[in-house]
């Protein structure tokens, strides 16, 4: 009796393992095809927005016109203001959010400078301009 139960159990488990293996092998091929297609598409699909002249020119334009706010100077405030710019499909700055605030007039000073910036090169998806975001950190340091 134990022998019959053991053989039955062995047959049952081996059948389920073989069935799982066949199912797993059948599922692998379509996933490999999809992964290959996705990697090809990602190489050409998206181009990030960029400032004309590069990041260094962007930071120079912001810092050249930036004055240290008097309230921040009097209170020895140092730190970083981080902005998120929304770049429209035509390259215009359409929205500015403060991600990290420093206060004491620093945020307002940076926002004023960003308002004077020329348009960006827009982000592209498959060659078409698209709305995207661009983060800008601005450091305030006392010398």
Image (cartoon, grey):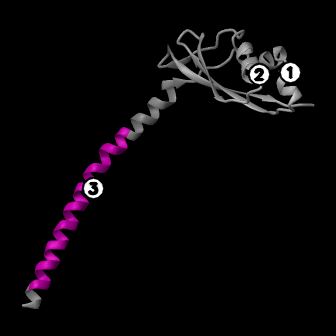
Residue 126 locus on image (x, y percent): 47, 19
Question: Can you say whether 77 is above or below 9 in the image?
Answer: above
Q: Which residue is mark 1?
A: 70
- Marks 1/2 in contact by CB < 8 Å: the verdict is yes
In the picture provided, is 126 more to the left or to the right than 19?
right
Pick the residue in front: 48 or 117: 117
Q: Residues within 10 Å of mark 2 (few under 14, many from 20)?
A: some
Q: Residues within 10 Å of mark 1 (few under 14, many from 20)?
A: few
Could you say whether the residue bearing mark 3 is in a helix, strand or loop? helix
Looking at marks 2 and 3 on the same chain, the residue that comes earlier in the sequence is marked by: 3
Residue 11 locus on image (x, y percent): 14, 75
Looking at marks 1 and 3 on the same chain, the residue that comes earlier in the sequence is marked by: 3
Residue 143 locus on image (x, y percent): 93, 31
Could you say whether the residue bearing mark 2 is in a helix, strand or loop? loop
Could you say whether the residue bearing mark 1 is in a helix, strand or loop? helix
Q: Which residue is mark 3?
A: 24
| Image mark for residue 105 | 2
């Amino acid at each position: 009796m134990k022998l019959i139960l053991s053989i039955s159990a062995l047959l049952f488990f081996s059948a389920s393992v073989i069935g799982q293996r066949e199912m797993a092998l059948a599922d692998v091929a379509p996933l490999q095809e999809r992964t290959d297609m996705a990697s090809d598409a990602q190489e050409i699909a998206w181009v990030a927005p960029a400032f004309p002249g590069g990041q260094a020119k962007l930071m120079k334009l912001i810092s050249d016109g930036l004055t240290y706010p008097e309230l921040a100077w009097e209170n020895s405030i140092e730190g970083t203001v981080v902005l998120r710019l929304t770049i429209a499909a035509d390259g215009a700055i359409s929205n500015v959010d403060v991600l990290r605030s420093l206060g004491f007039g620093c945020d307002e000073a940076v926002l004023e400078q960003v308002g004077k910036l020329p348009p960006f090169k827009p982000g592209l998806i498959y060659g078409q301009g698209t709305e995207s975001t661009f983060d800008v950190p601005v450091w305030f340091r006392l010398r």
